[in-house]
Amino acid sequence: MSFPNGFLWGAGTSAYQIEGHHGRGESVWDVFCRRPGAIEGGGDGSRACDSYLRWREDIELIKELGLRAYRFSTGWSRVMPDGTHADPKALDHYERFVDALLEAGVEPVLTLNHWDMPATLTWAERSTVNAFAAYTEPVAGRLADRVTWWITQNEPWIIALLGFQLGLHAPGVADLGTAVKAGHHVLLGHGAAADVLHTHAGVKAACALSLFPCDPATDSEADWAAAAGSDGYVNRWYLDPLLGDGYPDDMREHWERALGHDLGFIRDGDEAAIGSRSDFLGINYYTRRVMAAAPPNPFPWRVVGPSGDVARTDEGWEIHADALRDLLIGLSRRFPGTPLMITENGGVFGDAPTHDGLVHDNRRVAYLRDHVQAVRAALDAGADVRGYLHWSLMDNFEWALGYRPRFGLVHVDHATGVRTIKDSGRYYAQLISGGGTAPDLPRIEAFG
């Protein structure tokens, strides 16, 4: 069955992961990458896919794939190298890029903060909220007349968890109290940026959340409680202030018990400054969490994963398309009237060019087919889904994992920058041209 008219079929990337350093100020990720052992393989984003210089080539790839939408980010550390003053040359670059997308018939989906922020700033400080609003102003001033869809923040939970709780991402802080405070400031930043965006007519602002459906490992009451707690920690702590009635009480109790004090950094008026500002919800879905009860460390649950032999990506993540279907249906029922957009969905599959020079990533093809079918099922059940943006357009710098994981529809030879469209990219192009109807799985022809 065809998807609705105007459904946004696309793919995504982010500035630090593809652009390279050319002409950019120092990012928190530049600092973090210099930390010994922080990045698998010792890589950094200094070259990445060199897309700041090769952006016209990337536009041609987008056109060849038939994408109707493209999610990208403006590099905060490029636009405001010192965290305070906007660089007109950077704004010129993004203006040319948006104009080229529109000329190609591609809808821009612009992310303001995809983790790449000036090294002078940190989400641990409340003052960064104002700095984020100040960064939003010149970007919106240049582009809001041509860009409808705006993502303020990408994955607040991941920023808080990996950047400030576990120290595995920039800025590399490992402190539980700082993590929950930083996560709150990220949400305040969403509200402040959305207020700036809404001064421009016609824009739609949202936050993109990394959402993980949480299922119990067994039918025991304790495991069900663990799954509910995990859902509060990963999902509801961000969903509820953005779309509901403020932070959930049960998770306030969990945080206060874990920290040993109340959450005094959540001030009067903060929840009002976060909520009622989202015109849609961005959903980044990769897998689910299977949970079991455990002694508090710091919370009384742990991820145990699915039992039995299940399909997995090369990163070991369970492939579970039905969980995406159920997530979309559940969100549409819990937050009626809020349009949904899948802003990331994909998997790590390490297929490289073979004997014929092509990349036969049949597992990604199957992944695409099954997850698009899950979106179709959610639409049939009444979910208001406006688009599907696959992660990612091309293989890129995958943060602390370096260049090993490959998420792309396009293979990138990281030594030369040469791009090769994979079988999954060709398949996706056929799927898009067919209105979402899944074509037959590709054959690999004999060679020689």
Image: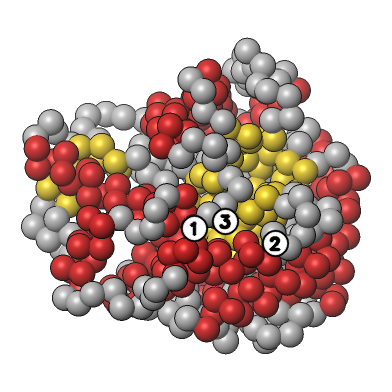
* Labelled disc at residue 277: 3
Q: Earlier in the sequence, mark 1 or mark 2?
A: 2
Q: Position of residue 21 (x, y in %)?
A: 70, 74
Label 1: how many Cα within 10 Å (few below 14, some 14–19, many 20+):
many
Q: Residue at x 61, y 80 (%)?
A: 131
Drawn side of residue 25 relative to residue 276, left or right: right
Would residue 159 be visible to someone looking at this image?
Answer: no
Q: Do the CB atoms of the residues marked 1 and 2 lie less than 8 Å apart?
A: no
Q: Do the CB atoms of the residues marked 3 and 1 lie less than 8 Å apart?
A: yes
Would residue 367 be visible to someone looking at this image?
Answer: yes
Q: Position of residue 166 (x, y in %)?
A: 32, 69
Question: What amino acid type is highlighted by mark number 2?
Answer: Leu
Question: What amino acid type is highlighted by mark number 3?
Answer: Arg
Q: Which residue is mark 1?
A: 275
Q: Residue at x 22, y 50 (%)?
A: 229
Question: What amino acid type is highlighted by mark number 1?
Answer: Gly
Drawn side of residue 158 relative to residue 386, left or right: left
308 or 78, which lies in front? 78
Q: Residue furthest right?
A: 103
Q: Is residue 26 above or below residue 95?
A: below
Q: Is residue 181 above or below residue 41?
A: below
Secondary structure of the residue carrying tag 2 is helix
Q: Which residue is mark 2?
A: 197
Comparing marks 1 and 2, which lies closer to the viewer?
A: 1
Q: Residue at x 65, y 83 (%)?
A: 83
Q: Position of residue 223 (x, y in %)?
A: 14, 41
